[in-house]
Amino acid sequence: MDGHELGELDSQQETGRDGPAEELLKVVDLCKHFPIQAGFWRRIVGYVRAVDGVSFALHRGETFGLVGESGCGKTTTGRSILRAIEPTSGQILFKDQELGWVDVAALDEGDLRVFRRHTQMVFQDPYSSLNPRMTLLELIGEPLLNNGVRDAAARTDRVAELLSLVGLRPEYIRRYPHAFSGGQRQRVGIARALALNPQFVVCDEPVSALDVSIQAQTLNLLQDLQEAFGLTYLFVAHQLNVVAHICDRVGVMYVGKLVEVAETETLYSSPLHPYTEALLGAVPHPDPDHRGHRTLLAGEIANPASPPSGCYFHPRCPYAEDECSREEPELRELQPGHFVKCHLAEELQLVGVDLEV
Amino acid sequence: MDPGILIDIQHLHTNFYLREGVVKAVNGASLTIAKGRTLGVVGESGCGKSVTAQSILQIVPRPGRIESGDILLHIAEGDLDETINITDLNPGDPLMRDIRGSRISMIFQEPMTSFSPVHTVGNQLEETIKLHQPKSGDEAPARVLDMLRRVGIANPERNVEAYPHQLSGGMRQRAMIAMALMLEPSLLIADEPTTALDVTTEAQILALMRDMQSELHMAIMFITHDLGVIAEMADDVAVMYLGRVVEKAPVRAIFHSPKHPYLQALLESIPRIQKRTGARLQAIEGVVPNPLDVPPGCPFHLRCPDFMPGVCDEVVPPDVTVDEGHTVACHLYTE
Ligand SMILES: Nc1ncnc2c1ncn2[C@@H]1O[C@H](COP(=O)(O)OP(=O)(O)OP(=O)(O)O)[C@@H](O)[C@H]1O
Ligand SMILES: Nc1ncnc2c1ncn2[C@@H]1O[C@H](COP(=O)(O)OP(=O)(O)OP(=O)(O)O)[C@@H](O)[C@H]1O
Ligand code: SF4
Ligand code: SF4
Ligand SMILES: [Mg+2]
Ligand SMILES: [Mg+2]
């Protein structure tokens, strides 16, 4: 097993704004390796190690952020947790109100349907995730219909209510997705995910296609729903200002692995991993007098089908030493609740972002 | 026409004819793009940014079409000095096809939409050259390699053989930029080109776009929601609301002395990375009006904190110049 045992993660009990909370979800050593096929016989010639030994725990009512370079496995992690795709290995434990801990990876079809009612996903790509031949009424009403809301009038009312909840006009109910802009489609996806009052939602870039005002509305909405229904979010995003705003804790991924996990304030103000430092340094500031202050990280992201030796970040890391290319560092809990996967974490003095709390 | 202006859009109207009625996606927008400079375009989602871009290229999808207005393209090369009104051309006009290929090109948020999955990246880049410059013949492969190198693709000899899905997100974005710049356009339209990218890859791509801009002296129309990216990239900014341009100014004025109540509210809505309060964000009250049923008067009046009854809901505010190069369409500033 790469990194750490589950017990270590359990030591991190403090969370959120209101102190300790009950655990809702535990991910243990999750792996998803996509086969690479070649030639006429579709022979498997290798594997893309999209998610490679990821472990973390989510507490009921918290928002856990997942950030990292494009292609580092964030979406794959979210989809595996919901069993939208089959993980290659690892455990996903979900705490059911009645049954206690259930292993999602081992659920049969029937139980999976029950699980899926409690868990939903807001998809990253608002263009391809909505069936173009269905109206909003059908798209958002589908999960309702599948879960027993047979009365058409009741369904229409609920869909109209959901549309206004996400800031779309109920008059649009009979329109098809192509008639909407990217941001409008994204909100359709959010309405669809919320239709069945889920407990846990994977939000995959839910606001990146939205302008800042609607983004603010949507983030406020997600927070209101969280407060009202005790929702738990896994929140994938590239915009670090949004992550800072909404997440209680953040995990940073690099090429299929978690390289740092901490509470949001701690991660931003005192990062321990050089890749986290690079991410924070690259954030664009909404101030034209601040131009040219973004640090440029050299090189391309490692290929997850043939990652470099040792620490995957070493070819791009400004602090790399000999040991880094030989030996893979472990994810260690350096301070309570602050995990980092870097050989030099104790010595490096990294620069974060000053937070006004 | 001012010789420094490349594109001059005047009172553009582009509509979609749906069964329920007419969507006025672009409803009288006017803006200019200066040669060699970057115009940032921001605005509420659905306000018509992408449709404005599609109109410039005459690629508005059905059931939409340009209804009226002018899109003047200024071409000055050697002895040639002429102005073409794009709205006078048919989408299929050979001149329009020539403009699309060699004078104006576009990159999208999702690079896969510009590539075919069944041909190698190298093949597709070569085809672009051959289609528009049939005489280029034998030099095409060398030019492709050169362009891939210029956009920072490592090992171009090997990567020309790659299919689009075999490249990482950041490399695909670079390949798409290479394709768009292959014919050295005078205008590059970038519609949210980095929205899907992480901040480190985004910083690389933006730096690349700036380098290519100064090398080729091209103008860029940069559409994005990210005001941080606008602050980083734009020389001038146009702010759109419900199909109209409501404020235009150089970038510093946009951030330091915003005039339109919509822009002021927009700037207030940005979550600041330094602030981790967990508190609610400032959002603009209400929703964007239905574009099927555009309200009379100022398009923002239903949500505006400075709303003046009898004026704002009756008269469309004209463009008022408040400073050099800074105009705003709001009754607070009319005499
Ligand atoms: N169905 C699939 N078949 C093969 N490879 C895949 C598949 N889905 C994803 N991958 C690969 O797995 C890796 C992780 O992809 P994933 O979509 O999870 O990344 P991500 O972190 O969500 O990136 P982004 O920020 O760009 O959305 C990538 O290298 C990707 O190419
Ligand atoms: N193919 C279409 N059919 C019908 N209506 C459309 C079509 N494309 C766009 N529209 C409508 O035109 C308006 C403008 O859309 P456009 O895509 O230009 O918005 P945008 O400003 O680019 O938004 P976003 O920031 O969300 O991408 C929207 O109200 C949209 O619903
Ligand atoms: S282990 Fe070495 S290469 Fe990896 S992040 Fe730490 S210092 Fe850099
Ligand atoms: S014209 Fe009136 S309603 Fe419109 S932005 Fe100005 S003050 Fe507000
Ligand atoms: Mg993703
Ligand atoms: Mg758009």
Image: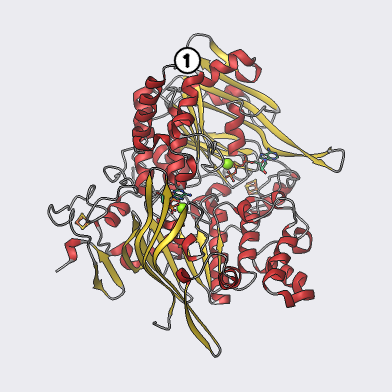
Count of residue discs = 1
Is residue A336 in view from this perspective? no
* Up/down of B55 relative to B242, above or below: below
Q: Residue at x 65, y 57 (%)?
A: A299
Whole-percent x, y for residue B247 in the image: 30, 63
Above or below, B116 against A19 in this view is below
Who is closer to the viewer here, B306 or B214? B306
Along the horizontal axis of the image, is A288 left or right of A49? left
Task: Let me know if residue B20 appears in the view.
Answer: yes
Q: Is mark 1 within 8 Å of ligand 1?
A: no
The spot of residue B105 in percent (x, y) is 56, 66
Q: Position of residue A200 (x, y in %)?
A: 48, 25
Q: In the rendered structure, the residue with mark 1 lies on which chain?
A: A
Task: Classify mark 1: residues with Cα within 10 Å, few (<14), some (14-19) or many (20+).
Answer: few
Where is A309 relative to A118, above or below? Answer: below
- Colouring rule applied to residues: secondary structure
Among the 4 quarters of the image, the one containing residue A28:
top right
Type of the residue with mark 1? Gly
> Can you say whether A58 is above or below B29 in the image?
above
Residue B7, how many percent across, how many down? Answer: 44, 73
Circle 1: element type: loop
Q: Quadrant of the N terminus of chain B?
A: bottom left
Q: Nearer the viewer, residue B284 or B83?
A: B83
Q: Residue at x 28, y 52 (%)?
A: B265
Front residue of this view, candidates B88 and A62: B88
The residue carrying mark 1 is A148
Of residues A325 and B166, the one drawn nearer to the viewer in this rendering: B166
| Residue at the spot 57% in from the left edge and 43% down from the top edge | A346
Query: From the viewer's perspective, is B165 left or right of A277?
Result: right
